[in-house]
Image (cartoon, rainbow, N blue to C red):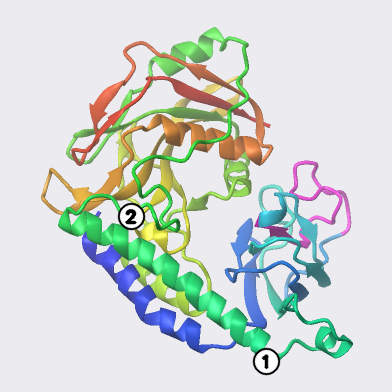
Amino acid sequence: MNRRPLLAVLVSAVLLSKFVSAQTAGQDFTYTVSTTQTWTDTGPDLHTGDVLQISASGTSCNPQGINGSTPADSPLPSAPSGALIARLHSQGALPILIGASHELRIEEPGHLSLGVNASGPAPCQGSFSVKVHVVTAQPASASTSSAKAVAPASSAAGSTTSQADDMKKKLAAAAQTWLAGQFGTGAASTSSSAAEGSSGTTPAAPALTISKDPLDAGLRKNIDGLPRRVNDEYNNLGDMVNFVIIGSQDKMQSALDAATWHVADTDSKEAALKAVLQTYEKKDYLQMPMSKLMLFGRYQDFGYEMAEPIAMVASRHHFRIWKAPFTWNGQTVWVGAGTHDIGFEKDQRNGKVTHKIDPAVDGERENIGSSLQKADKVKSMTYYLPPNPVQDARNATGGGYHSDGRILVVFLQ
């Protein structure tokens, strides 16, 4: 990956962080929520005790949804199809009906996503205009009735300071990892927690619930015939194929969205601009572009990533996924290669800076499986060891990695 888009994102975030610290605690926000996008992350951090007063309107689409039956696989089957819904990331994956208006109380720190209650294409093509008024949590020391009714000015200042401090920590972690990769000073300090995985090891994922049933013989044969590794445009072999997902494109995308994976941007210049704008709007930029690699003679169909905000510049979980040239029992088969970026190193092909991956790549395979399992989108999962497994290799940029060679096969609900 070229260093300039990465540096542009980092520098832009540093410059704009002063705007964040200069503003008072954000209390009013306006969003445009497209019905073509499953979830829209609103960005601002929310704290225990905050109250959100949400109102929505639409020129061509009604945020209360449409009359009629709602598909059973919609995010919220009990609500009208096409209605505006919300999800609090810290309070589980179950969505909440918003409709034209709703008030939410935050039980634990997190952030809010807004979406449309639809399975596949929404019944109405358009967007909602959504206004969110945040009533900042009252400090615990305040006890008088007047203090409960109106938060003191110091509360707003304290919230602003907290936001600024949080931004500084994220920027410091990203910059620390960036400099480590630029000048060869080793991994970033483990004392900084914002750059997840900066110490060079992937955090242990929750244990996977693995089925003991053997794979169908036909599916085993198809997996045996898969390329073991992806390659770059110069046919340099790279990351290993380490997971397979079985389910329609809609199911696959919905499951990954529920598991809080973000689709990567594809244009580096647009990404740098988007990072600037979202930082200014107090949103987290979570869609850093990734390089294009090939399987089945073509570039990835989708790239997904997951990381701490800002620290994504240096550290992120990510994978590329391709639609297989075969199906199983009439279902689409998706073939993926996942790795965990933990910093930067020299690209052996051209001497430029590129992301360094955690050499223990099985950790990312487990992370992908556990995220889908936690989102309750898995029907069953099993490991499969194909012939001639990849166990010790180098990626296309020259970074080494190792694996037990198994492929995680995930059947979606």
Quarter of the image for the C terminus: give it: top right
Tell me which numbered mark, 1 or 2, is placed earlier along the sequence: 1
Query: Which amino acid is tagged 1?
Result: Ala
- Residue 133 magenta-drawn? no
Q: What residue range appears in magenta?
A: 67-89
Report whether residue 278 is seen: no
User: Depth check: 1 or 206 in front?
Assistant: 206
**What residue is drawn where x is 40% and y is 47%?**
197
**What residue is drawn where x is 57% and y is 44%?**
256
- Residue 77 magenta-drawn? yes
Residue 248: image x %, image y %? Answer: 60, 35
Secondary element under disc 2, as helix, strand or loop, is loop
Left or right relative to 363: residue 47: right
- The answer to whether 45 is drawn above or below residue 211 in the figure is below
Residue indicated by mark 1 = 153
Report whether residue 259 is seen: yes
Mainly helix, strand or loop, the magenta region? loop
- The answer to whether 106 is drawn above or below residue 373 in the figure is below
